[in-house]
Amino acid sequence: MTTVFVSGASGKMGRKVVHMLQATDDLRVVGGLDRAASDAEDFPIFGDTADINVTADVWVDFTIPTAARKNAEYSLAHGFDTIIGTSGMSNDDFAALGKIAADNGRKVMIVPNFGISAVLMMQFAAKAAKYMPDAEVVEIHHSDKIDAPSGTARATAQAISKARQAKPVAPKQTDAPARGEWIDDVPVHALRLPGYVAQEEVIFGAEGESLSISQISYDRSSFMAGIRLAIRNVADLPDALTVGLDSLL
Amino acid sequence: MTTVFVSGASGKMGRKVVHMLQATDDLRVVGGLDRAASDAEDFPIFGDTADINVTADVWVDFTIPTAARKNAEYSLAHGFDTIIGTSGMSNDDFAALGKIAADNGRKVMIVPNFGISAVLMMQFAAKAAKYMPDAEVVEIHHSDKIDAPSGTARATAQAISKARQAKPVAPKQTDAPARGEWIDDVPVHALRLPGYVAQEEVIFGAEGESLSISQISYDRSSFMAGIRLAIRNVADLPDALTVGLDSLL
Amino acid sequence: MTTVFVSGASGKMGRKVVHMLQATDDLRVVGGLDRAASDAEDFPIFGDTADINVTADVWVDFTIPTAARKNAEYSLAHGFDTIIGTSGMSNDDFAALGKIAADNGRKVMIVPNFGISAVLMMQFAAKAAKYMPDAEVVEIHHSDKIDAPSGTARATAQAISKARQAKPVAPKQTDAPARGEWIDDVPVHALRLPGYVAQEEVIFGAEGESLSISQISYDRSSFMAGIRLAIRNVADLPDALTVGLDSLL
Amino acid sequence: MTTVFVSGASGKMGRKVVHMLQATDDLRVVGGLDRAASDAEDFPIFGDTADINVTADVWVDFTIPTAARKNAEYSLAHGFDTIIGTSGMSNDDFAALGKIAADNGRKVMIVPNFGISAVLMMQFAAKAAKYMPDAEVVEIHHSDKIDAPSGTARATAQAISKARQAKPVAPKQTDAPARGEWIDDVPVHALRLPGYVAQEEVIFGAEGESLSISQISYDRSSFMAGIRLAIRNVADLPDALTVGLDSLL
C-alpha cells in the first residue's frame, strides 16, 4: 500500500485524481491541500502547509506552477517523494527542486504530460527517426485551441530532429501558408476543426515503405494511468530530479 | 462493340491504353496515330492525320496539349467522338474544340484526371461541405514532387469553398511555415516524403462528429477504369463539350 | 420562425434538443410532452396528449418506439408534421403512420440516425460501390458495446451490396475468427477497444487506387445539426412518409 | 570498406541487392554464386561453392531455404559472416547453423523480414502493449494474397500477447465471420482488396486515449535499407546466431 497526499485536492484535476486513488487497491489518499480546508472527504484537506499533520509516501501536486514550487519545497523537506503535474515550470524551478530533493534524500518528478499514448508516440518517433529520417507531423485540435502547433507536436518535432541527421529542404515561401510551422527542420502541420479533441500523427517515409504513429486524447481520464505509474515508481527513480514520464516507460 | 482510335499510341500512356483496350471485350482498337508509323501491332499506326484511312466511334488522345488540339480538330471533323486526356489545355482550347464538336454533331470530352477515386473524393467533399463547412485538406506526395499543393488538392479546396458559406479564421503568420497553402479559405497541408506516391485526405469536423474522405493513387493503372468509362459513355453526353469525368459519375 | 413541440421533453435527449432549439434563432419551442407535467421552462410541458392546448409546425419525438407511435397518431391528426427519432420502429409502424399522415395531409419522418456524417458516409459508400465494387467495412466502438457489427456498419454493408454487382470470395472458415461478419457479401470487421466512442471506415480498393470514407461520432451533440435540418425541411418532403435523413442530404 | 559475396546473385532479389551494393560507397561486391556462372558483371559469379576462389567479409544469401542452409555451411566454414534472407528455415536449421558459426568464430544472421518499418512496428507494438494492453490488428493486402492473416500480422499479435497480461473476451461465434483470426487472444482482422500492396495497423485503446502504429510496404526496395544495416553490423553481433533484424534496431 502506497500512501498519497494530494495538493490541489479540490481542483478539477485534483478531484479526479482523488477518485482514481480511492478506486485503486494499492494506493490510499491520506490527506490533501487546498485553499479551502475541509473534512468532507474521508481524509483531511488542509488549508495551508503549516497545518499539515499527516505524512505520506508520495505528494502529488495539481496546482499552478508558482504554488507547486512552494508546495514542493515543503513536501521534499518533510519526507514526501513529490510528483508535480504542470507544464509551466522553468529550468530554474527544475534545478532548485532537484537540489532540495537531493539534499533531503528524496525524489522529485515533474511531468508536463501524463498521457501514456503521447509519451510512447514521442519515444517511438525518436527511435524511428534514426532509421527513417524523413518525417512530418500532423496534429488536429479543436478549433478553439488558439496556439499552434501544439506543445506535444513541438516536442515531437524536436525529438525527431535530435535523433536524426537528415535535413529536408524547406519549402518556398508562400503569401498564404496553411497553419503549421517548420520546427527544427521537421514540418509540423496544424489543423483546427470543430468536433476534434486532440490528436497527433507522425508520418515517416522511406524508399518503398512508410511508418505512421498516431495518438488521440479524448479527455483527462487518459492521464490517470500515467499518474498511477508515476506514484508507484517515483521512489525507485535513479535521480533526485526527473522530468517527464519518459524514463518510466 | 465500340471501336477506338488511339492518338499517341506509342507513348507511355498510349501503350498502356492499347493494352487495356485489347483486354476489354466490348472495345476494339482499329488504328493509332504516332510520329513513328508502324504495322507492328494488329492495327495500323499512322504517322500523320493526312494518312489516316480508318474511322472509329471514339478517338482518344494521350499526347501533349498543342498536338491534342490539332488532332482533335481533325477527329471531330471526321466523325470521331473525341476524348482528350491531358491537364494542360486552356479555356480557349475548350471553347474552340466545343464549337467544332457542336458544328459537326460530335462530342468532345477533356479529362485532366481519369482517376475515379480522385473524382469521387472531390464530389463527396463538395457535397459534405454543404453540411459540414469546416474542412481541411492534407495531401502527401513523393518528395520528388516539386510543386505544392498538388493540382488535385487545389481543385478539392476550390470545390469545398464553392459549396459552402463558412470562412474560417486564417492563422497568424509565422516566419517558418510548413509546406501548404490557404486556398480559397481552405487550409491545404502538403507533405513530401519518400516512399509515398500520391494521396489526399479531406477532413471535416463538426459539433460532436467528423468525416474524412481519403484517396490513394498507386500508379497509372488506376486511370484505365476511368478511360473505359469515358469511351463507353462519350456518345451519350448531353453537351458538345464536357470537361472532367465528373458528369459520368 | 418555425414552432416546435418536443415529445419526451424531460428525457436525456429531449433536454438536449430543447437547449438546441432555444439557442437557434429561427426555431422556437412552444410546448413539450412528458410523463411529469411541468411549468419550470418558458414553455408548458404536458403530462398527457389529452391535456395539450398548443399547436406547432413540427412535432419531434424522442421517446421509446411504442410511445412514439401512439404520440404520432395524435400529432399527425392534430396538424403537426412529425419527426420521430428512434431506431426501433417496425415496418408495420412505418405503414400505419404513413397512412395517417397521408389522410391528414401531413408529413411524418422517422429517423433512426440523425448523425449527418454517418448518413453522408453511407450515401458516399453506396455511390462509390458502383464504380469501385471491392469494399470492406471496419468499425470501432467502445469495448462496452456488446452487439457487433454496429447497426450503422450493417446498414453500410447492405447499401454497398445493393449498389454493386460484385461478389467477393468468402474466406475459408477458421475455428477462431476475429469479431466481424460477412454481411451481404461485404466483410465487416468489428473492433472493441476502450477509449474509442464510435467510428466506422469504408475502404474501397481498385486497380492502382483506393478510396476510404470514415466517420467518427464523439457524442450526441452530433445529432443536433441533423435534427435542425429535419425540422426545417419536414414540411417540404415530397412523400407523406420518409424514413431516414438521407433524402434531405 | 566492407566486402560482400552475394549468393543467388542472378535471382530477382539477388540482382536488386547487387545494384544496391554497387550504389553504396562503403560496400563492395566481390563475388556471387548462382547456378549459371557468369563473368558479365564486374565481379565473378561462380556456379558452385567448389569453384569459389574469393573471400569477403560478409556472405548474403537470397536463395531458397534448402540451398541457403547448404551454402551457409560452406560460407561459415570459410571465413564469411553470413546473412540469410529467407523466411522458410526451421528451428533445426537455426540450431545447426548457429553451432557451425560458433565453432568457426563467425556470426550467422537469419532475417525473415528486412523491412525496417515492419520490424519497428512490431517493437513499438510490444512495448505499447505493456502499458495499453487492449489491442487489435488490422492488415490489408492485395486480393491475390491467399493466406490470411499475414505472417507479419500473426507475429505482431504474438508479440503483443507475450508483452501483456490482459485477455479480452472472445466474440460470440457467427456463421459468417469476416476474414480474420483470434491469435493468442489478439483479434487480427484481414482485408483483401485490389489496389493495396501490404499494410498493417495496430490499434491500442485505453481510458480516454488511443494509440495506433501503422506500416505500409510498397515494394521490395524497402528491404534494401535493412540489408545494408545487417551487412554493416553482422560482425559486431554478440551471439553466433541471430534471428531477425530486431536486435539491430
Image (cartoon, coloured by chain):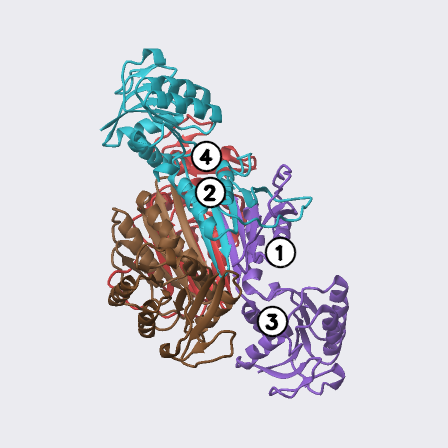
Chain colours: A cyan, B purple, C red, D brown
Estimate the x, y position of residue C86 in percent, counting from the top left. 38, 46
Q: Which circle's residue, 3 or 1, is located before the other in the chain?
A: 1
Label 4 to label 2, Cα distance in Å?
32 Å
Amino acid carrying label 1: it is: Ser
Tag shown at residue C18: 4
Q: Foreground mark, 4 or 3?
A: 3
Label pair 3/1, CB-CB below 8 angstroms: no
Q: Foreground mark, 3 or 2?
A: 2
Pick whichever, A211 or B5, lies toward us: A211
Residue that label 3 marks: B230
Question: Which SS class for mark 4?
Answer: helix
| Same chain assignment for discs 4 and 2 | no
Label pair 4/2, CB-CB below 8 angstroms: no
Estimate the x, y position of residue D192 in percent, counting from the top left. 40, 65
Pick whichever, A41 or B179, lies toward us: B179
Say if A107 sits above or below C78 in the image.
above
Pick whichever, C16 or D58, lies toward us: D58
